[in-house]
Amino acid sequence: MKYKILFLLFLFCTAISGISQVTVRGTVTDAADGTTLPGATVLVRDTAEGTQTGMDGTYQITVSEDAVLVFSFIGMASAEIPVDGQTVIDVALEQEIASLQEVVFIGYGTGTKQDLTAPVTTIRSEEISRQTTVNPAQALQGKVAGMMVTNFGEPGSQPTIRIRGVSTVFAGGGGPLYVVDGIIVNNINFLNNNDIESITVLKDASAGAIYGVQAANGVILVTTKEGREGPTRVDFSTYTGFQQVTNILEMAGTEEYIQLLNQRTGLTGVGNFFDPGDFSESTDWYNELTRNALVSSHELSISGGSENSSYSYGIGYFYQDGILHTHNPGNANNFNRLNFRAKNEYLFNRIKIGYNLIFSKNNSTHAYNYSLFQAYVAPPAFRARDDSFDWTDPTALGFSGPFANPLASAYYYNSGTDLYNIIPSTWLTVDIRENLKLRSNFNATLEFGQRKNFNPTYYVSGLQNNNTSSLNRNNDFNRNIQFDNTLEYTRLINNHNIKLMAGSSVQEFFSTYLSGNAFNVPELSDETRYISLGDDTNRNASDGGFKSRVLSFFSRTSYNYDSRYLVTATVRADGSSKYNEKWGVFPSIGLGWVISQEDFMAGQDYFDHLKIRASWGQLGNNNVPANSSVIVGRPGPGTTGIFGGDNPVPGLTFQTVFNNFLVWETVEELNAGIEVFSFGGRLSLEADFYNRITNNAVFYAPIPGVAGTSNLLGNNGKIRNRGIDFSLGWSDHNRSGELSYSFSGNFSTVDNEVLEIDNESGVIFGALTNGQFLTRTVVGQPVGAFYGYRVAGVFQSLTEIDNYTSPNGVILQPDAIPGDFRFENVNGDDRIDDADRVMLGSPIPKFLFGFTANAGFRQWDASLVIQGVSGNKLYNAKRANRNIFPDANYDMDFYKNHWSGSGSSDTYPSAALTRRNIFPNSFFVEPGSYIRVRSIQIGYALPADVMSNLRINDMRVYLSAQNPVTFFRYNGYTPEIGGSPIATGIDNDTYPLSATYTLGLNVNF
């Protein structure tokens, strides 16, 4: 009886099962072209049951009649379809434009690319982590249209970043604002590349207006990684490799050098004649002074979370030797960084609290950069040390100096910096109600710095020695406290999407320093090198500091109708303690029209997404010294009488002179752009035109000497930057997903022009070289342009010199000799003088471009980044300055092309570079254009079955090369030369940028 009952129950269950089950067949295709999709996934929603389509795109699956099938394929939007008893379900999947829906950080909030009305570029962690750079900012090179990142070769150095040209000259140097997880910081050198989730660049005024007086030169928002719900994840990354000098100048050897010296003596009658047979040495000083150098990085992170909490911890160590060789193990040029971060967040019902702690310790031992110039001019006919290992005196061989032994200079130079950063922050988020959220964020940035320069006693020669040791120490402390509060309200009413945000920010910046120096300091070790141990009679100390505050109120309104019509309006009011007129208001507005959402675009196949947008905004610049509008004086007893009296009268000595009328620089920018996605999102295009004007530009203006100082900050100018930013990309994969590839490129134009300078001369003078002003900021020209004489050729004979006359018959260059430059008489008078100096070029590139390519096939991946600039000039100051040393060496380019007799050259002068020849002139102004391969990387990920056996989630090994190849015409070892806005592009032997080759490993447990 029991078996009969069981049998009946079995039949009953089978019958029920048969009634509720249905077999579904169908084909999955690409909606764009109707082709079938092999390997598409078909899953039953909320279960692990499913199947895949075959090679012909068909599938078959048995499911319950009320099931919901989820169809998905790589690069396409998923589709959910209820079965409802159907037996045939054909599905056409649409291409997914993932980038439009990605969350973008826009300052005090987030948005999506689709709904933005301003030009914003986001670089994701995958692109950043695959760059083996010291500073995460360097990973942005070539990836953001309109952004120029200029590297310096010294270990641990900060890159110079300009966004859309040069908008300011003396108010902060023109660098962008850095914001890390909502915290305003000076730079991001304390972060590892693998710490970063994304970097977002706000390029125009409407995007940056939410940061008001701190965003005049653009904003870089950095979001660090955080834990996610799921099991604990352990990531370990390491790489090691070496750096190698590239493009080192080829200098004349002893034979060529002596030949040039003898030519010089024959032309001028000054100096000695030398016999090449008297010299057996031929030293390549650049080769002696440089080396292959080690670089390594090790990072470990742990992250995870649950439904109500998340955590992320990371620690990293980076080490980099410098390629300049000091030949002194106790004073080797290097940089190392140790950093730690912790980020936790907890959810209690509607309240979320969290904290973030970042710590870093940077240590740098600096190189003596001037030793590079010494290597450029040093005669090759002597070696660094003699057979007794004593330093060799270059002047002992009869050469006219004053020469230094470059290796001895590098050996004895002792300078180091220790820098500590501690950045604690905490935040509270309260969901007051469904659509209303309050967020409070309190943070502090603490920076401790110690800089030490020690000069020991030594003797190399009568011209290169030091009889008394000296020590200079400088300790500084910077503190930035920031307290932000925001209230955000979102509401969707039918197709009207509204987001309102209002907030306040309080910021206090405090800085102080203490410095001192002493002589006759003990030299045994660092432990004995203290100012207190120096000579009691010759010690000095100084200190100083300042404090400034900013109080801000801001709001942003974002509205879109049906993701079709977009409006974003922002206003920020800032009050700063730096000005007598404390408050400034900075508004912006952005409009967008997503044309592809219109009904009349339905059915067209050309555009998946088409948007036009326009924006306008104002920004301020608060980056002037804290005492710029206040007077600082020091009372004194006085030394003379007044009004004819004989008795000294006490008075006040001005330490600073204030400008009571100094106000903010104000950047006003208009931007118009278009965004296009086509071919199922595979093709992307973005183009923007911008016109950016800096009003009330801050310049130093000359004032009468009776005021106690020669210059005063004032709002004396207007600067314009305008241009076009253009980006184009293509991303695709094959049907199986085994092969994927993407290409992206960007191109920008920059037109920089000074519109007004409100001083008597209409000129702001800049950098000096050989006692002459090389750069000038002049109305109608770019900021910091090169000015000098225009070379019209080279004199071939004395007759040609005598025949080079003014319209009045006056010989223009009577002191010239054959082989000297012939300068153009620009104004047509009777002499060559300052009035004949003209604009010779600008160091600001007119064109910027970058190209990125990525490809993956099965376990293999490869990437390439290329970046370059064009339309700028560089000033070869080291070549011009060599004439300070009468018997200085020459580079081989000069040797091969120099004037050596009538008709030999009309562009290069003779070996006798006379004093007038080295005044700023067009010969030393050279093309600054270059194309540089920034990064090449090839990686291999272990197959899934191998990783399963090893009990790891992912493992990838890779080979990488940074800066391996550069194409340029400049006669130096690097065309990438930065500097301040009025002294950019001047090559005084910049620290060489090296090529870096590494082998790396990424492991995830």
Image: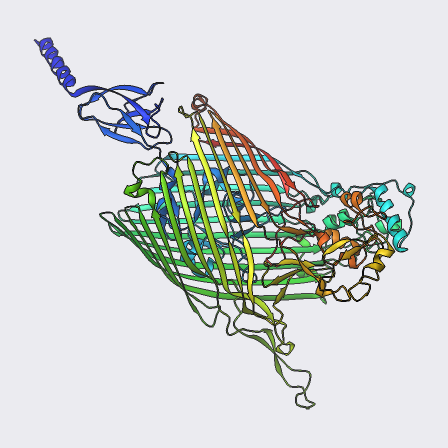
On the image, the x and y values in percent for residue 12 come to 11, 15
The quarter of the displayed image where residue 311 is located = top left
- Note whether 885 is above or below 235 in the view shown: below
Report whether 228 appears left or right of 817. left
Report whether 259 appears left or right of 215. right
Question: From this viewpoint, is residue 67 visible?
Answer: yes
**Which one is in front, 146 or 384?**
146
**Which one is in front, 145 or 325?**
145
Report whether 608 appears left or right of 936. left
Report whether 595 appears left or right of 702. left
Q: How is the image coloured?
A: rainbow
On the image, the x and y values in percent for residue 183 come to 44, 53
Position of the C terminus, as image quadrant, is top left
Position of the N terminus, as image quadrant, is top left
The quarter of the displayed image where residue 733 is located = top left
On the image, the x and y values in percent for residue 629 come to 52, 71
- Note whether 773 is above or below 21 in the view shown: below
Q: Residue at x 35, y 31 (%)?
A: 76
Q: How many marks?
A: 0
Question: From this viewpoint, is residue 308 visible?
Answer: no
On the image, the x and y values in percent for residue 680 come to 37, 34
**Which one is in front, 175 or 169?**
169
